[in-house]
Image (cartoon, rainbow, N blue to C red):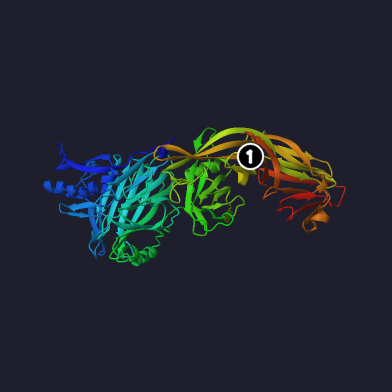
Amino acid sequence: MNQLALARPSHDVEVRTRRASPGEEGFVTIESFRRRRPARRRRSHARAPWLIVAVIALGGLTLTTGAATRGAALSPGEISNGTLRLGVNPEGHLDVAVDPWSILGLVYVPTGADGLIHGCWCEGWGVADRTSGLSGWASVGNGGISPNLAVRAFEVTAGTADSTVELGGRLRVRHVFRPSPRPELYQVDLTVENLGATPADIVYRRAIDWDVPPTRFEEFVTIRGAHPRLLASTDHGFQDVNPFVPLANLGGIGTFEDLGPGDRGSVFDFTLGVLAPGERTTMTMFFGAAATEAGAVEALEAVDAELYSLGQPSTPDGPTLGTPNTFMFGVTDGAVASGPVIARGRLMPTRGGGIVNGSVGLYLPSPSDAPSEDTLIATATTASDGTFTLETPLTSALAAAAAATDGQINLDLVANVNGSTYHLAIVRAYVGGAWLDELGNAPTQLALTPVSGVVNPRLIPNSAGGATSGSQAYGSCATYRLPIASARAWTTVGELHTPADTELATFTYGRKADSYISKAFSLDGFIWFMKGTVRVANETGSSGSATIAFSTPDDMWAREIQTEFVYTKYRTELWCSSPAAVLVSRGYEIRATEWVGSSRLGASLGHLVNRCEEDHATYVATHPRGMRFTRDDSTYATFPNAASVTVGASTLSLSARSGMSRWVTVEWLFGTKFADHVLCGTDAFPPKSSRIFAGR
């Protein structure tokens, strides 16, 4: 297991000082941690800010962080747009001691209320690379400052704050705080950049402990909306901001309305995608407050923040009207630079079911012959009608997969919503800055129907309110692929039909395979469903040895042509941390994985010869003496029972289709005895038809 399955307990932060060593000035802040005691949490948190101020006042000094001691000491900053005041730390988190007698989190100036600073200073953020296991974070009370975090720049003006930090020299994280178009909101532009030499799969966490006056520690909390990057959200404002620490909750998971009253907050996990070396990605957030809930929601909608949290007091009108002040955190959808659309579709409800609303994920299956982890490429949250759109740039992982499969990439589109499993194998190619389907078209809307009502082993990690199985909630998750068995099976990849007076007819397949073969999916290994297709396009040997061809001078000849593929049976497993590693569920699939290169004739198709004018008169094409006709492009037919596959004690009948391309061609050289020779298409003329028959 990787670090996604590992957990460490949540902690409180204790801040104390020591006298400076030679070469240091004044006092230096030391942070140590102790295990959180839930029963005493509020009491200990409530004292912490005043202890910090007292310590600073004793020395008349500026509070510094462990990161700042690596260079010049950096002071926290206070920024304002007239309606809001924020205290920003050099690492990009809120809650600061502005001076020896003033502390500041997020203040709504019209009421003077600070929605963060009372009690636990628990606002903060964390970033993790799920590939390497690297993580870093910054919060006063929700994990402190990670030891691998270094502040590279921190600039503050009256209205802006710009923080840049680096994590272990491998990730750069920048938070830019600036006024938004709405005075009720401060905008925070996040940028994460991969400084390393290998791809990084980025998760970003933001946690907020709402303490809303005049009834601080007794607030109502709401989380509404959706976001294509959202992995999970809960009401646990005291959550450790290290993304590798599993998310906990205080009763609220996913989205909820007016949960409380109680001492609650909000925490969000987002996937920022897989970043190639040197690549960066962005996301835009907002902190703010308004006089009413309606005013807060109106401001959030004005900046297109479709996912947000509200913190409201437990005054008589607090949970309903949001008076006298409603605090908010929002994330905008439109500002996420995620790349072109790679898939769009709709999750269809079960029979008699209603709204299908949850998360969808796109996985790149691991090509390894050994147990390995699949790569999560993109996630999206569905609209209330089940529709979704997935976007991603051409990452290094996708580029490598395309190079191995002649430019087209096999992907798995999966979801588990309301106990129903959705699964579909799709093929994509990246051409001219856009994603195209296997036919070379822009992705059209797919309709995904559920398989059954049990947990999908490809459940989206931390999505739709957390990975769930029954009533059990889990933390960070990863999907692993374990090969069980492999077997070869003859598979129909083409056919050849000849008319009377044929000089020579030839079907050629190679030097790379070019077949789309159906994939079988099962939840238990016994009941199988055909769920999409897999492209097999591996190169086998040299151009000479890898090409198979059948030529015949026979008149009125028609046969299927077959070659062998390797079919592999996999078990997929979903492992999560809860907090220890736990196996959540399993599933099974059988897919074609390799072309062998052998060949043989398949079934006779003689019953289809000499039926062009009777059955396909609309698409008849005649050719004179001695002429040649070659077809080497456009989609060719699907053979419904192309292969009988027995692998790992499972026997299935799979369909297959071979694309007419530079790797698959069919050619006729007509004789000289007759004046014309007939070919016909079944649904178009021979250059574009899905099948080509011969003879009048």
Total marks shown come to 1
**In the foreground, 633 or 293:** 293
Left or right of 147: which side holds 21?
left
Badge 1 element: loop
Out of 592 and 472, give the one closest to the viewer.
472
Q: Looking at the picture, which amino acid does disc 1 mark?
A: Lys
Residue 631 spot, x, y in % from top left: 71, 48
The reply to whether residue 662 is visible in this rendering is: yes
**Residue 570 point in image, percent of width and height:** 57, 37
Q: Residue furthest right?
A: 673
User: Is 536 rendered above or below residue 184?
Assistant: above
Can residue 197 be seen? no
Classify the position of the N terminus by image quarter. Answer: top left
**Residue ID at (75%, 53%):** 681
Q: Label 1, on which residue?
A: 512
The picture places residue 58, in percent across and down from the top left corner, at: 11, 46
In the depicted view, which residue is nearer to us: 63 or 260? Answer: 260
Residue 294, quarter of the rendered image: bottom left
> Left of 251 or right of it: where is 605?
right
